[in-house]
Image: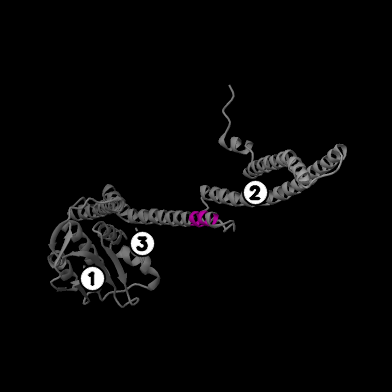
């Protein structure tokens, strides 16, 4: 039993698009030429004969018949030559246009093949065939850029995950091996180290699950609450951690009216921002949590006096697993997920989040805006 033909073989066996387009246009031109020739050969002589009679033709019947035949012959010949020239010219133009269209489609197909093979830098030039083809090329290039960015993020994510998992796994393995060899006893200290490593793995898994759920869509239960109360509650939760590190946590909570939020979810946003600020602010520094009303918006700001962020990193801070200083953040226990979760939660509340920094060593300010209630 013979195997079915492959899709690639079937595609190669089909006529090319340019050939089909040229044949279709040739059929239209030939049909138009035949129609013109038939109408001219049938209608032209009768109209000429009517004009001769209206002009008072005095020729004999034989002379009149000869004149009409001469006119008909000249008409058919001239029309035939004109139609043949026009058809050939039109076919030449159609052939040129078809080749350009075929070349443009071929460029798209070749770029798509490159992307399918993992070469995401393939781009399609503007073919210069009009707005529709320019839009197709632009849309394709944007798709390729998005896929390239997604692939880059995926590779970075896998590398970060591998690194995040490697350290606690190595710690667990080393301590278990030491216990097996009798170098260490399975006492509370050893169990504490192992539990700490497994806890780090658990937190990493929870962070991954949280960011996936946040970006896929979160169900939030929105209720009117006092805007300042939400910020005060987040500050109270974080105050002990700040005190333990020696960082001053300040609050500037004005009466900003009410906002419609899920208190738990939005508390998580402010908690992530406060934890991020604490992680990058040295002992003796200060972090300020502020809340105020600006027109129809309620604005929350978390400003620190910490390490700051270079300008080239600012647009990427809310990307998953992105860290402006990878070694520093790993040393502080950051997984690069908290800010991505914060952005997803803020957007689920119909708001926006942004970050500014004057540069390294000059601190950073995260700003969250939510629609306020009147």
- Tell me if 259 is positioned left or right of 310 in this view: left
Of marks 3 and 1, the one in the foreground: 1
Q: Quadrant of residue 248?
A: bottom left
Residue found farthest to the top = 1
Q: Based on the displayed image, in which of its 4 quarters is residue 277 positioned?
A: bottom left
Q: Residue at x 36, y 69 (%)?
A: 314
Dot 3 corresponds to which residue? 322
Mark 2 neighbour class, 10 Å CA radius: few under 14, some 14 to 19, many 20 or more: some
Q: Main secondary structure of the magenta part?
A: helix
Query: Could you tell whether 198 is left or right of 118 in the image?
Result: left
In this view, the residue in front, 223 or 155, is 223
* Front one among 99 and 34: 34
Q: Distance of mark 3 from mark 1, alpha carbons?
A: 20 Å
Per the rendered image, the range of residues in magenta is 133-141
Residue 199, visible in the rendered structure:
yes
Instruction: Work out whether 206 lies above or below 296.
Output: above
Badge 1 is on which residue? 302
| Relative image position of residue 309 (x, y in whole percent) | 34, 72
Q: Residue at x 23, y 71 (%)?
A: 301
Tell me the CA gap for discs 2 and 1. Answer: 60 Å
Mark with earlier residue (2, 1) = 2
Residue 290: in sight, yes or no?
no
Q: Position of residue 16 (x, y in %)?
A: 64, 42
* Residue under pointer 2: 98
Neighbours of disc 3 within 10 Å: few (<14), some (14-19), many (20+): many
């Amino acid at each position: 039993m013979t195997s079915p033909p492959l899709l690639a073989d079937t595609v190669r066996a089909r006529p090319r698009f340019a050939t089909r387009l040229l044949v279709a246009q040739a059929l239209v031109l030939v049909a138009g030429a035949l129609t013109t020739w038939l109408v001219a050969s049938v209608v032209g002589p009768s109209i000429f004969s009517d004009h001769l009679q209206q002009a008072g033709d005095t020729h004999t019947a034989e002379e009149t018949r000869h004149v009409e035949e001469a006119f008909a012959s000249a008409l058919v010949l001239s029309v035939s030559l004109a139609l043949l020239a026009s058809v050939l010219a039109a076919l030449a133009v159609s052939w040129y246009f078809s080749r350009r269209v075929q070349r443009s489609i071929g460029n798209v197909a070749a770029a798509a093949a490159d992307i399918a093979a993992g070469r995401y830098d393939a781009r399609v030039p503007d073919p210069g065939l009009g707005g529709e083809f320019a839009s197709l090329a632009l849309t394709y290039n944007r798709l390729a850029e998005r896929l390239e960015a997604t692939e880059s993020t995926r590779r970075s994510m896998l590398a970060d995950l591998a690194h995040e998992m490697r350290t606690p796994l190595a710690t667990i393995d080393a301590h278990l091996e030491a216990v097996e060899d009798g170098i260490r006893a399975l006492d509370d200290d050893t169990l504490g180290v192992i539990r700490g490593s497994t806890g780090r793995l658990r937190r990493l898994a929870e962070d991954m699950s949280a960011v996936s759920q946040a970006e896929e869509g979160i169900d939030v239960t929105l209720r009117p609450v006092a805007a300042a109360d939400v910020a005060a509650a987040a500050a109270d939760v974080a105050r002990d951690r700040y005190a333990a590190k020696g960082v001053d946590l300040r609050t500037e909570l004005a009466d900003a009216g009410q906002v419609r939020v899920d208190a738990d979810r939005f508390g998580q946003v402010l908690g992530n921002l406060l934890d991020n600020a604490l992680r990058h602010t040295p002992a003796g520094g200060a972090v300020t949590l502020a809340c105020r009303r600006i027109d129809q918006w309620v604005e929350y700001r978390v400003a620190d006096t910490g390490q700051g962020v270079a300008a080239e990193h600012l647009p990427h801070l809310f990307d998953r697993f992105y860290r402006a200083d990878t070694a520093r953040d790993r040393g502080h226990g950051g997984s690069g997920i908290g800010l991505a979760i914060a952005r997803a939660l803020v957007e689920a509340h119909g708001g926006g989040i942004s970050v500014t920094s004057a540069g390294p060593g000059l601190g950073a300010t995260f700003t969250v805006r939510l629609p306020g209630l009147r």
